[in-house]
């Protein structure tokens, strides 16, 4: 297996409440750009952190500018990479390659390995408490987040936004489940906290898909519904951030405890 290159920092910028870092590392020869947000804390204090995984046709920076900034105000660091074929790593037309089952499986394995590398990056960062690392996934990122948490016991909590099981009754689903089975993965969380947030009118990941995944998960778990479609309102992000900070050990004042 090709080695993972050390991360290269391209830019570092002071922002309200902390620092924004643009960095990149290589996994299997592919460059993986990411944005890291670090809250401003006293020297020597280690903060909790969350890996943020974006949706289809999106990019890591979208997660940084929404979830990441909300978590930053609560004293939680975050890392948001671009997934394969997303952001600066490809053009939306490149997503046509997902119609090829072999290529789709290869990209899924690559995304899963890259996400594992990102978790390890957070756990070994000098500003991060390695025992308090969570994963937040939106839509496509929620499928990846569930599989990642099933493989990596180091993931202490999981937030799935607009996520669920695969749709039922299609030949593509039967094929996809050989490489990606959210039900099997969520059963392997084994007592780690899970929060699912979902729109009651989501036409992409339908409510019944969310309900199936939630039913398969073990306690502790919560499913919170919002009067929304596939895009969730700002209030849902704030609410999920409150839930996550509680489970990562951050007080109401934003101080790491």
Image (cartoon, rainbow, N blue to C red):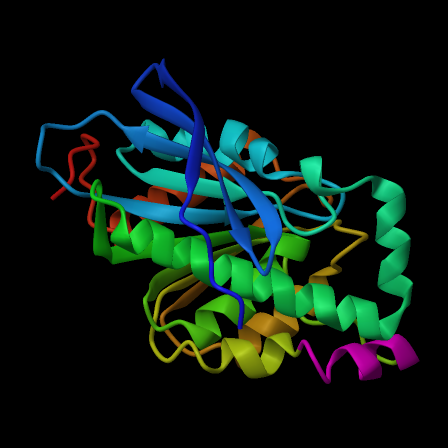
Q: Nearer the viewer, residue 63 or 2?
A: 2
Q: Is residue 68 left or right of residue 252?
A: right
Residue 28 spot, x, y in % from top left: 59, 61
Which residue is rendered at x = 26% and y = 53% of the image?
124
The answer to which image quadrant residue 42 occupies is: top left
Q: In the drawing, does residue 227 fall left or right of residue 121?
A: right
Q: Is residue 152 left or right of residue 256?
A: right
Q: In the rendering, at what x and y percent does residue 76 appear?
A: 30, 38
Residue 162's place in the image compared with 171, above or below, is above
Is 217 in front, or is 78? 78
Residue nearest the viewer, comparing 23 with 57: 23
Count of picture labels: 0
Give how far across and how far down residue 77 sits, in percent.
33, 38
Q: Main secondary structure of the magenta part?
A: helix
Left or right, residue 231 beside residue 216 = right
Whether residue 170 is visible here, answered yes or no, is: no
Quarter of the image holding residue 71?
A: top left
Q: Reply yes or no: does residue 50 show up in magenta.
A: no
| Residue at 43% over, 42% down | 79
Q: Splitting the image into 4 quarters, where does residue 111 fall?
A: bottom right
x 29%, y 32%: residue = 74
Compared to 102, does 239 lie above or below? Answer: above
Residue 20 is at least partly visible in this image: yes
Where 55 falls versus 192 (above or below)?
above
95 or 89: which is nearer to us?
89
Residue drawn at x 71%, y 43% as measured from the top left: 86
Which segment did they paint magenta? 171-180
At which x and y percent is residue 21? Answer: 41, 28
Quadrant placement of the C terminus:
top left
Query: In the displayed structure, would residue 18 be above or below residue 134?
Result: above
């Amino acid at each position: 297996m090709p080695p993972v290159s050390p991360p290269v920092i391209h830019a570092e910028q002071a922002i309200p409440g902390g620092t924004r870092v643009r960095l990149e590392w290589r996994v299997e020869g592919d460059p993986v750009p990411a944005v890291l947000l670090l809250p401003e804390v006293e020297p020597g204090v280690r903060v909790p952190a969350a890996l943020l995984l974006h949706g289809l046709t999106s990019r890591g920076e979208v997660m940084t500018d929404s979830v990441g900034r909300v978590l930053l105000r609560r004293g939680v660091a975050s890392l948001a990479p671009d997934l394969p074929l997303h952001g600066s790593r490809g053009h939306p037309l490149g997503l046509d390659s997902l119609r090829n089952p072999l290529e789709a499986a290869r990209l899924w394995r690559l995304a899963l390995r890259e996400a594992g590398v990102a978790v390890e990056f957070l756990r070994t960062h000098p500003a991060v408490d390695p025992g308090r690392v969570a994963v937040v996934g939106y839509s496509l990122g929620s499928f990846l987040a569930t599989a990642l948490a099933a493989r990596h016991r180091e993931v202490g909590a999981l937030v799935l936004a607009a996520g669920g099981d695969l749709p039922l009754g299609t030949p593509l689903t039967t094929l996809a489940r050989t490489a990606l089975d959210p039900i099997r993965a969520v059963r392997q969380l084994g007592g780690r906290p899970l929060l699912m947030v979902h729109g009651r009118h989501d036409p992409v990941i339908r409510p019944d898909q969310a309900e199936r995944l939630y039913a398969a998960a073990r306690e502790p778990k919560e499913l919170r519904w919002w009067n929304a479609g596939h895009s969730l309102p700002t209030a849902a992000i704030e609410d999920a951030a409150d839930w996550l900070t509680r489970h990562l050990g951050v007080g109401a004042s934003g101080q790491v405890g």
